Amino acid sequence: MKLPLSFYTRPDVVQIAQELLGKYLYTNHNGIITSGMIVETEAYSGENDRACHAHLNRRTKRTEIMYHEGGVAYVYLIYGIYHLFNIITNKKDKADAVLIRAVEPETGVEEMLLRRNMADAKPNLTAGPGVLSIALGIDKSLYGADLTGDAIWVENKGSDVAAENIAAGPRIGVDYAGDDALLPWRFWIRGNKWVSKKR
């Protein structure tokens, strides 16, 4: 069952980031369905979070979708090669987001291997926000996509993760954010081999 809009429009982005663990991210790219269980997320909390693109209420062509009502995709490019997929949450103008950092492959693994030019389904297939986007066919064309639509969505299959099985730590790659870089807003399923490794 697809997550309803009401899941995304709640105010607590940290809670949503945790509750997305164990849910399944689906894409329909050129008629090919791929999916994976979300095993790692990071929360970003709007204008007061120095690690967030919307810090100090910055509004640019890239970040404008962050001010949309929750339940849409924010996809942006880093290093000129990797698309990162974020889920916008909260009400209009709040600019909260959850970065999906890793998934455990489920549907369409053969297609994922082709997209990643890999022979075997090793954890680095989808363990990391850039490579999971390649595997799932996520690119800038999904910027602003409705997460209750048919191009990209999240399903609840009843595999909620118990609190004791969720690990938390600082987010990755946000050292510039001062004290906010230390916030334990990265969440992952404890012991899952598909979680990305901190480099």
Image (cartoon, rainbow, N blue to C red):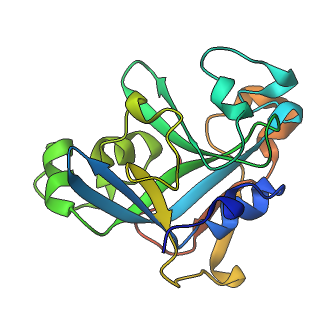
- The one nearer the camera, 148 or 197, is 148
Give the residue drawn at x 57%, y 67%.
Answer: 3
Q: Is residue 131 left or right of residue 25?
A: left
* Residue 196 shows in this picture: no
Question: Which corner quadrant of the image does residue 177 belong to?
Answer: top right
Q: Can you say whether 100 is above or below 158 in the image?
A: above
Q: Residue 42: where, in percent of width, then height?
A: 65, 50
Give the residue drawn at x 46%, y 52%.
Answer: 149
Q: Is residue 22 left or right of residue 141?
A: right
Q: Residue 103: where, in percent of width, then height?
A: 42, 60
* Residue 148 shows in this picture: yes
The outermost residue toward the left is 119
- The one nearer the camera, 35 or 78, is 35
Q: Is residue 121 left or right of residue 69?
A: left
Give the residue drawn at x 49%, y 32%.
Answer: 143
The outermost residue toward the top is 60
Question: Which corner quadrant of the image does residue 165 belong to?
Answer: bottom right
Q: Residue 46: where, in percent of width, then height?
A: 81, 36
Q: Can you say whether 108 is above or below 140 in the image?
A: below
Give the residue drawn at x 78%, y 49%.
Answer: 90
Question: Which corner quadrant of the image does residue 104 belong to?
Answer: bottom left
**Total tally of numbered discs in the picture:** 0
- The one nearer the camera, 143 or 193, is 143
Q: Can you say whether 7 is above or below 119 in the image?
A: below
Q: Residue 76: where, in percent of width, then height?
A: 51, 28
